[in-house]
Image (cartoon, coloured by chain):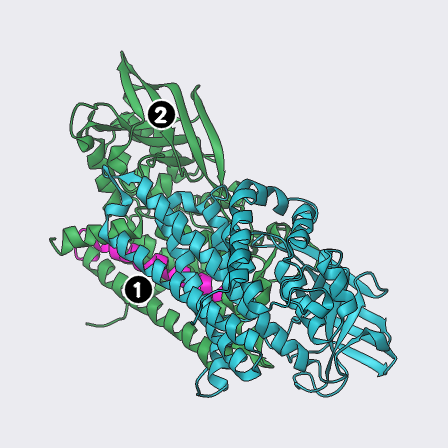
């Protein structure tokens, strides 16, 4: 039956929801976001213990043999609590790339909670195009020198290893000729300019100046890095849509509570039809985003490249657009209170806003979806 | 019917443009252009420069120190100053309490307050909203109890913009709670240095400090500081709703934002070409420009009716709704234009004189904070839902 969860998936979902409900109140989140690293090491250890870090990986690598669906269920729960742990960056995207490249040695470390990853998939001039890579890797196999700039590299300040697409052949926007390199974050020539982001994540501008990379630093095939990167980003996009669905659920339920309790003109705001209908629209957007997100992770799990790409872009175009509407209406219905930093709703709004452009905004994914031509997803 | 403003008004536009070009301090212009933080001195400094030229109170008649401009001239002044990155003059004295004192105040109140508003010597803030009274303003609970020649005021106001810059606050207070809620409200002028007033900042989601809570704890206010009759404050509140609301259209500022959007879209790249050449994005800019045009033409019709002696009524609600939606639309496109550089949160880059290289392009740092901050515009000054209610009641007769 479509969308029916297995027993294991149900248990995973319940455990993730329970964690967020019991242990991830907004005060906890605020404290962690303001801490030195911006997330909770104790939570990360707990994720490892609960098996969440290994959920999407093959059993041969010490994982649990799940995939994007399981990661999506966790991301959705984390979205409801606005968790600041870098699950998306280390497990879903970084781990996804390692798994596709067959690096089970590193996956074991990751699953044990001992490895943090960041991927430099964006460059200052490249907007959302993964193939726009000006960073170069010069030299011959076995000894290359990497130079360039990576923009807004999420989780870079905490990362042990950086995954860096660099050009080994071809022109700046060629799809062919990109190679993925795995570099220690403290390698000579790696310079980080760290900062917080609008939604309390951590990221950095990464400048690479003649960073040496031997043959063992190559992830996947030389010149064919996009064969790993594009599907891994599609998977991560699908999982991010699940997180968006979680954030939207929180936006809807908090707004629903607020307008039920806030009285003006002697009656609850929820008695005004104009607000009831807006609330109904928000509910529809949230439900359909969840549907699209589930579709995307199911397609991702099936591993059929084109269908997975179409589904990821469709879901992301949808989530970006509807997430914006739900976020804006949530603030509007909270009135002045929604504008304050103190009220949780504004943090949820900022997160859904930033998710809007992560891995490409609605326009980017509309273009991509349209460019893939017609056909059943 | 034509769209030409006439040669006299054209000459006036040139005069304003030339004045701004010569007199707006360059650092203030730079802050406005780049969306950096303004200080109180920047705003008041500009007001004083205008005052020295006789333009300190643009909307006022000559008897109170205003330039006695026609509605068209007032519109031209707003548009020109907005478009050329002048700070917005604080409206609380000039556009709110000033006109109230002119219409309802005693001679003593006029003499005491009006010259200092026009000259920017005294700053005002507005004590309307309360924690329990937002859209339902008339339900306000801050009480003023008569004690001889004084009132004793207790209660709390909130969302008070610039209370931390203000010397005086004008307040709606409850002076009778035994009658219909609109009939027991009075309008008081309160010196912010009075004992018993506490101002607490409210930090908005992007990290800015514009609004405050203001607490009144046994604050003594002379009865002579009441404007109009006791329990007639609601009449004054309604008077303000329709007064000088055409400036709310913010045509000049939106034009400046549209120009900025076009510049940024030309500088940003998409697939190796300027974002401005992307059909999808170009269409969005075009749509914003058309929305701006529709608003400007509607405003000009209202200004024209005003010039012919009409009093602006619920049209102000139309302007408020569409102007704030347009500001939000432009803010959204600006954030969208910069792609991933909408993510870094670098508040230090919003301080004037910060000289480090910026994280992304130098125009990027302010754009997400501005987007977040602009959500307020459809909430404050009577939420857009309240404005739609006004249109449906007063225009459509429902």
Q: Which residue ends up furthest to the front in the rendered image?
A: A7
Residue at disc 2, secondary structure: strand
Residue A376 place in picture, x, y as percent: 43, 85
- Residue A309 drawn above or below residue B383: below
Q: From the viewer's side, name the closer residue of B379 and B303.
A: B379
Report whether residue A241 is seen. yes
Position of B140 compared to B210: left or right? left
- Residue A333 drawn above or below residue B161: below
Q: Which mark is residue B155?
A: 2
The mark tally for this picture is 2
Q: Which residue ends up furthest to the right in the rendered image?
A: A143
Residue B206 place in picture, x, y as percent: 52, 49
Main SS of the magenta part reads helix
Q: From the viewer's side, name the closer residue of A127 and B224.
A: A127
The stretch in magenta equals B307-334
Identify the image quadrant of the N terminus of chain B.
bottom left
Q: Chain of mark 2?
A: B
Residue A161 place in picture, x, y as percent: 77, 64
- The tag earlier along the polypeptide, 1 or 2, is 2
Residue at disc 1, secondary structure: helix
Position of A228 compared to B34: left or right? right
Please give the residue where the numbered disc 1 appears in the rendered image: B295
Quadrant of the rendered image containing residue B129: top left
**What residue do we see at 38% from left, 69% from top?**
B288
Q: Colour of chain B?
A: green
Q: Which mark is residue B110?
A: none
- Residue B345 drawn above or below residue A26: below
Residue B326 is one of the magenta-drawn residues: yes
Crowd band around label 2 with a 10 angstrom C-alpha radius: few (<14), some (14–19), many (20+):
some
């Amino acid at each position: 039956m479509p969308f029916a969860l297995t027993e294991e998936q149900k248990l995973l979902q319940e455990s993730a929801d329970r964690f967020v409900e019991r242990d991830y109140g907004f005060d906890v989140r605020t404290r962690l976001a303001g801490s030195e690293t911006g997330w909770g090491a104790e939570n990360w250890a707990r994720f490892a213990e609960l098996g969440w870090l290994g959920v999407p990986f093959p059993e041969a690598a010490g994982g649990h043999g799940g995939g994007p669906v399981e990661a999506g269920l966790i991301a959705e729960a984390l979205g409801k609590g606005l968790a600041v742990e870098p699950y998306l960056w280390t497990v879903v995207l970084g781990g996804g790339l390692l798994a596709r490249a067959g690096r089970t040695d590193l996956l074991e470390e990751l699953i044990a909670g001992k490895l943090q990853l960041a991927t430099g998939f964006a460059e200052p001039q490249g907007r959302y195009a993964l193939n726009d890579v000006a960073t170069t890797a010069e030299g011959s196999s076995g000894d290359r020198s990497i130079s360039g700039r990576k923009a807004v590299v999420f989780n870079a300040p905490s990362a042990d290893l950086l995954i860096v697409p660099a050009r080994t052949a071809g022109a700046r926007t060629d799809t062919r000729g990109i190679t993925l390199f795995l570099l220690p974050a403290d390698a000579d020539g790696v310079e980080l300019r760290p900062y917080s982001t609008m939604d309390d994540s951590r990221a950095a501008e990464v400048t690479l100046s003649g960073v040496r990379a031997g043959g063992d630093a190559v992830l996947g095939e030389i010149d064919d890095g996009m064969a790993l990167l594009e599907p891994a980003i599609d998977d991560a996009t699908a999982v991010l849509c699940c997180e968006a669905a979680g954030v939207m659920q929180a936006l809807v339920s908090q707004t629903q509570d607020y307008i039920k309790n806030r009285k003006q003109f002697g009656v609850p705001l929820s008695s005004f039809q104009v607000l009831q209908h807006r609330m109904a629209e928000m509910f529809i957007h949230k439900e359909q985003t969840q549907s699209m997100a589930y579709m995307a992770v199911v397609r991702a799990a099936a591993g059929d490249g084109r269908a997975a790409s179409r589904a990821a872009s469709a879901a992301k175009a949808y989530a970006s657009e509807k997430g914006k509407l739900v976020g804006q209406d949530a603030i509007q219905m909270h009135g002045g209170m929604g504008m304050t930093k103190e009220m949780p709703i504004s943090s949820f709004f900022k997160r859904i806003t930033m998710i809007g452009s992560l891995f490409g905004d609605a326009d980017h994914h509309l273009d991509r979806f349209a460019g893939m031509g017609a056909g059943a997803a | 019917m034509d769209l030409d403003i006439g040669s006299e008004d054209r000459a006036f536009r040139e005069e304003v443009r030339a004045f701004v070009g010569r007199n707006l301090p360059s650092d203030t212009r730079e802050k406005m252009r780049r969306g950096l933080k303004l200080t109180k001195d920047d705003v008041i400094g500009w007001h004083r420069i205008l005052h020295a030229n006789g333009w300190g109170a643009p909307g006022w008649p000559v008897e109170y120190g205003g330039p006695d401009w026609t509605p068209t001239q007032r519109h031209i002044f707003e548009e020109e100053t907005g478009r050329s990155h002048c700070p917005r003059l604080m409206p609380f004295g000039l556009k709110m309490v000033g006109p109230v004192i002119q219409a309802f105040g005693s001679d003593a109140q006029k003499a005491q307050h009006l010259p200092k508003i026009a000259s920017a010597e005294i700053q005002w803030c507005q004590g309307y909203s309360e924690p329990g009274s937002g859209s339902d303003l008339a339900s306000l609970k801050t009480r003023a109890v008569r004690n001889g020649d004084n009132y004793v005021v207790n209660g709390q106001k909130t969302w008070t913009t610039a209370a931390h810059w203000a010397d005086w606050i004008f307040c709606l207070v409850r002076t009778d709670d035994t009658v219909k809620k609109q009939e027991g409200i009075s309008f008081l002028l309160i010196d912010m240095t009075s004992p018993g007033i506490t101002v607490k900042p409210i930090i908005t989601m992007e990290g800015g400090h514009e609004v405050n809570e203001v607490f009144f704890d046994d604050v003594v206010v002379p009865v002579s500081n009441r404007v109009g009759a006791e329990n007639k404050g609601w009449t004054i509140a309604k008077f303000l709703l329709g007064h000088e609301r055409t400036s709310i259209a913010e045509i000049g500022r939106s034009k400046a934002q549209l120009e900025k959007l076009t510049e940024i879209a030309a500088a940003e790249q998409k697939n190796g070409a300027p974002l401005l050449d992307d059909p999808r994005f170009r269409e969005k800019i075009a749509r914003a420009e058309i929305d701006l045009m529709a608003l400007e033409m509607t405003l000009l019709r209202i200004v024209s009716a005003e010039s012919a002696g009409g009093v602006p009524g619920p049209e102000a609600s139309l302007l408020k709704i569409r102007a704030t939606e347009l500001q939000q639309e432009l803010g959204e496109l600006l954030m969208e234009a910069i792609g991933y550089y909408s993510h870094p949160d670098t508040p230090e880059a919003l301080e004037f004189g910060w000289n480090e290289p910026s994280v992304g392009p130098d125009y990027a740092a302010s754009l997400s904070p501005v987007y977040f901050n602009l959500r307020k515009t459809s909430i404050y000054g009577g939420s857009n839902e309240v404005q739609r209610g006004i249109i449906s009641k007063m225009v459509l007769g429902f």
